[in-house]
Amino acid sequence: MHTSAKPDEQPFRIYTTASLGHAVRHYREEAGLTQAELAEQVGIDRTYLSRLEKGEGTEQLRRVIVLLRRLGVRATLQHADW
Amino acid sequence: MHTSAKPDEQPFRIYTTASLGHAVRHYREEAGLTQAELAEQVGIDRTYLSRLEKGEGTEQLRRVIVLLRRLGVRATLQHADW
DNA sequence: CACGGATGTCCTAAAATCAGCACATCGTGC
DNA sequence: GCACGATGTGCTGATTTTAGGACATCCGTG
């Protein structure tokens, strides 16, 4: 018990807004939150979160970042050319 | 010449819209593109890209994804809890 | 199968974003 | 210092998104 707590999970790769939605749902469920709870905690509407998870793709980045922070998820960017 | 081409770069961690802006600028410059060129290639306005790189934070995720794809950048999500 | 909680979806008004122009500023080369 | 390309920024209208309510659907559980 000195380095990592949940190391054995694959990161999600985000290609589309739909894949973002899947990831958010995964982390939300893992956190044991309902849509209503998470939405309220980050100040967005529940129906909006529902649509986001379904991948409607109209999200504003600012809201997504708040959402991820709340879920303890880190977003990283790196070269994909290999 | 068998595995990776540009392996020795640190990934960018995205905490805020400002850090996204920095990352986009980094990859754009690395690609040798001007704002006008990149903006035109992904179908957004140059002034909008300028503001995005400055971190104004009002972007829609859909546009950001197109931008990253164009720059050959991969976005990933993973647990940050450790 | 009735109930309750969670989620999906339609609709509208209200709010926020984006494009595009004009012009300012910054760097660099001459 | 001037010219020129690249970038920053204020502004406005047109477009798009979001909140919120209402209701449907789905799924466990008793």
Image: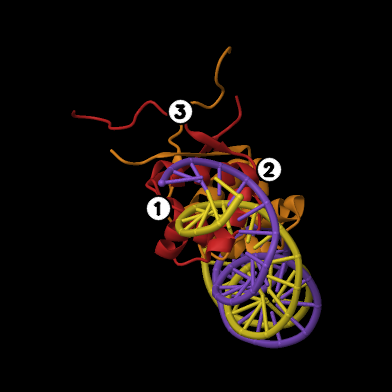
Chain colours: A red, B orange, C yellow, D purple
Residue A69 is situated, as x and y percent measured from the top left of the image, at 40, 52
Instruction: Answer with mark 3 or mark 2, whichever residue precedes in sequence.
Output: 3
Q: In the shown orientation, is residue A50 left or right of residue D25? A: left
Given contact means CB atoms under 8 Å apart, are the residues at marks 1 and 3 in contact?
no
The residue to which callout 1 is attached is: A69
Q: Is residue B18 visible?
A: no
Vertical order, C19 against A11 (above or below): below
Q: Residue furthest top?
A: B2
Q: Quadrant of residue C10?
A: bottom right
> CA gap, disc 3 to disc 2?
21 Å
- Image depth: mark 3 or mark 2 in front: 2
Vertical order, B40 against C25 (above or below): above
Q: In the shown orientation, is residue B39 left or right of residue B55? A: right
Are tags 1 and 3 found on a single chain? no
In what quadrant of the picture does the C terminus of chain B appear? top left
> CA gap, disc 2 to disc 1?
26 Å
The residue to which callout 2 is attached is: B70
Q: Residue furthest left?
A: A1
* Residue drawn at the location 63% of the way across and 41% of the way down: B31
The secondary element bearing badge 3 is classed as loop
The residue to which callout 3 is attached is: B8
In what quadrant of the picture does the N terminus of chain B appear? top right
Disc 2 residue type (three-letter): Arg
CA neighbours of label 3 inside 10 A, class few (<14), some (14 to 19), many (20+):
few
Disc 1 residue type (three-letter): Arg
Disc 3 residue type (three-letter): Asp
In front here: A38 or A65? A38
CA neighbours of label 1 inside 10 A, class few (<14), some (14 to 19), many (20+):
some
